[in-house]
Image (cartoon, rainbow, N blue to C red):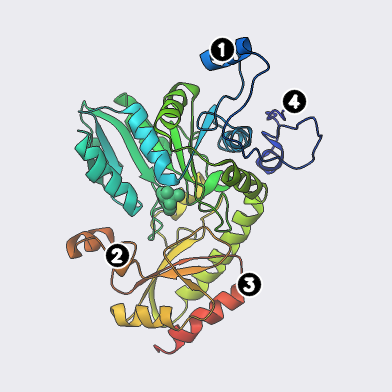
Amino acid sequence: MHDETTPNDSWALETLAIRAGHQRTHEQEHGEPIFPTSSFVYASAAEAARKFKGEEPGNVYSRFTNPTVHTFERRLAALEEGGRCVATSSGMAAILATVLALLQAGDEIVASRSLFGSTVSLFDKYFGKLGITTRYVELADLAAWEAAMTSRTRLLFAETPSNPLSEVVDIAALADIAHRSGALLAIDNCFLTPALQKPLALGADLVIHSATKYLDGQGRAVGGAVVGREKELEEVFGVVRTCGPCLSPFNAWIFTKGLETLNLRMRAHCENAQALAEWLQGHPAVARVHYSGLSDHPQHGLASRQQKGYGAVLGFEVKGGRESAWSVIDATRMLSITGNLGDVKTTITHPGTTTHGRLSDAQKEAAGIGEGLVRVAVGLEAVEDIRADLARGLDALI
Ligand SMILES: *Cc1c(COP(=O)(O)O)cnc(C)c1O
């Protein structure tokens, strides 16, 4: 193994996504190789001893390190402008490893109210059991974040923009609030990816990814990653290596190849989403569209400053509540009825009875999840075909 392509400071994101982290073997292959092996061998007992002790760099066992996984980690670290990346078996494993690595019993988390459902369960049900408590606040309300902090707060955790209402928080301001109290800020950057938003450059300490979504972008594999400074990531690595939620080499290879088209895909996702949001806004059966790319979105200005694009997840409210929302979903013939997102295939779901179905009526109201709300994760089909598929149900409501 030699000739590792070192990320060059002057390379643009488009170049890093294609070139960073590639380790060419003696075969001189052009594409990134896969190493489907659980363990590695040594030339001598002495070499084995040095590698086990960590005195000499090199692979020992694929729960610790694997060259294919390493390529993905280096490439994503370069894109997120982080010192180090640790890949995990899923996005949830990335959050689990981060909290296990950096918090202990008695510590507190302050988190956005608008988080991925399993993240909330992880915080409440499992970290709660370990004596780590979480308080939830309105994503965009900086005063609420500040008020929820105590001397025990170690971690602030947010997704921005939120799902499915596209609310946005000022990452730099949130980082200031965290750092004033000696806490860390973690941003789940799943919805925008480094092609559209770089939380570390804005002051966040940790970036979380579900690679399952846009990093792959084609719905082929489950995986995750944490990116940040060497200091914290060495601890995260320790958890993954010891507790075992490591990424498989095959999935790492899929994600590495996925990153090569990330920038192109995200630009196309955004273009489709913008066109669809504008069309929905003008449709007489639609009461409201939630998309930060629309000029009447409450945080359009902040989103425009902080993000290079507005992403491709949007919510819209149809007039007539659940019955109307379901009829629009059921009238589609091409769109996939599923809660997943971050795929070339457009997906559609009714958050109130699926992704957010476990919330009480009061929680739904507080989170703005109405009965008429439909979420679309806009894919890369021709936008006129996506529009036609939605128009069938929407036109029938007028
Ligand atoms: C899907 C998702 C996760 C969890 O990722 P998995 O790969 O499914 O474990 C976490 N955060 C966000 C925002 C997600 O969309």
Q: In what quadrant of the picture does the N terminus appear?
A: top right
Q: Which callout, 1 or 2, points to the residue nearer the camera?
A: 1
329 horizontally vs 31: left or right: left
Q: How far apart are marks 3 and 2 (CA)?
A: 28 Å
Relative depth, front residue between 160 and 124 = 124
Mark earlier in primary sequence (3, 2): 2
Residue 369, labelled with which disc? 2
Q: Which of marks 1 and 2 is nearer the N terminus?
A: 1
- Which sits earlier in the primary sequence, circle 3 or circle 1? 1
Dot 2 falls on a residue whose secondary structure is loop
Q: Nearer the viewer, mark 3 or mark 1?
A: 1
Distance, label 4 to label 3, CA atoms, is 43 Å
Q: Position of residue 358 (x, y in %)?
A: 25, 61
Residue identified by numbered label 4: 2
Q: Is the C terminus in the top left, top right, bottom left or bottom right quadrant?
A: bottom left
Percent of width and height locating residue 333? 52, 81
Q: Which residue does the image show at 46% across and 80% down from the upper left?
A: 283
Mark 2: amino acid = Ile
Distance (Cα) linking label 1 and label 4: 22 Å
Callout 1: helix, strand or loop?
Answer: helix
Frontmost residue, 340 versus 301: 340
x and y percentages locating residue 371 in the rendered image:
28, 73
